Image (cartoon, helix red, strand yellow):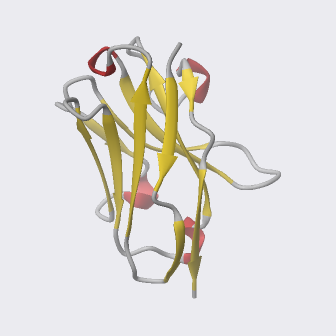
């Protein structure tokens, strides 16, 4: 069983930065591609970013391109989401997710494991 624990969320002013971390345990981290999603209450889950097993390929939703950077450290079993130039519309609960198999990176249903989420709030 894989366990994912997010951290790094908080309150930040518009234009500020946060770095989210997601610690992976239970299975071999490098066997999993990783993704970040976000979800507001009463709304659907939104894909934010994904990174492949060795970090060789990265994917972003259009609204965060140029502002967010996903990375992973397989020695530390951790995936990161560096968020710069934050906007109030980035306010959400951010979740990391892990998947064994390739496919549609933005499809949350294809991910095998999920963390509990971390709140990011951007004030205007």
Query: Which residue is depicted at the point 44% across and 17% down?
Result: 26
Q: Residue at x 32, y 37 (%)?
A: 78
Residue 108: which quarter of the image? top right
Q: Quadrant of residue 37?
A: top right
Quadrant, the C terminus: bottom right
119 over 38 or under it: above or below: below
Residue 118 in the image: above or below residue 26: below
| Residue 110 position (above or below residue 115) | above
From what the image shows, is residue 39 above or below residue 30?
below
Which residue does the image show at 46% across and 25% down from the upper left? 98
The residue closer to the viewer here, 101 or 66, is: 101
Could you tell whether 8 is left or right of 52 in the image? right
Circle count:
0
Which image quarter: residue 76? top left
Q: Nearer the viewer, residue 100 or 46?
A: 100
Give the image location of residue 70, x and y in percent. 30, 47
Q: Position of residue 11 (x, y in %)?
A: 55, 75
Q: Residue at (45%, 59%) from the top-left corner?
A: 8
Q: Position of residue 94 (x, y in %)?
A: 56, 51
Query: Left or right: 60 with respect to 110?
Result: left
Q: Nearer the viewer, residue 93 or 105?
A: 93
Which residue lies most toward the right here?
42
**With 64 as the anchor, is 5 left or right in this view?**
right
């Amino acid at each position: 069983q894989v366990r994912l624990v997010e951290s790094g969320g908080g309150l930040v002013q518009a234009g500020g930065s946060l770095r989210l971390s997601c610690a992976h345990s239970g299975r071999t981290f490098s066997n999993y591609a990783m993704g970040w999603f976000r979800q507001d209450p009463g709304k659907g889950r939104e894909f934010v970013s994904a990174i492949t097993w060795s970090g060789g390929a990265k994917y972003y939703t259009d609204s965060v391109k140029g502002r967010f950077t996903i990375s992973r450290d397989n020695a530390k079993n951790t995936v990161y989401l560096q968020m710069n130039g934050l906007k109030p519309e980035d306010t959400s609960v951010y979740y990391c997710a892990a998947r064994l198999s390739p496919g549609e990176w933005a499809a949350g249903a294809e991910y095998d494991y999920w963390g509990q989420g971390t709140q990011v709030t951007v004030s205007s």
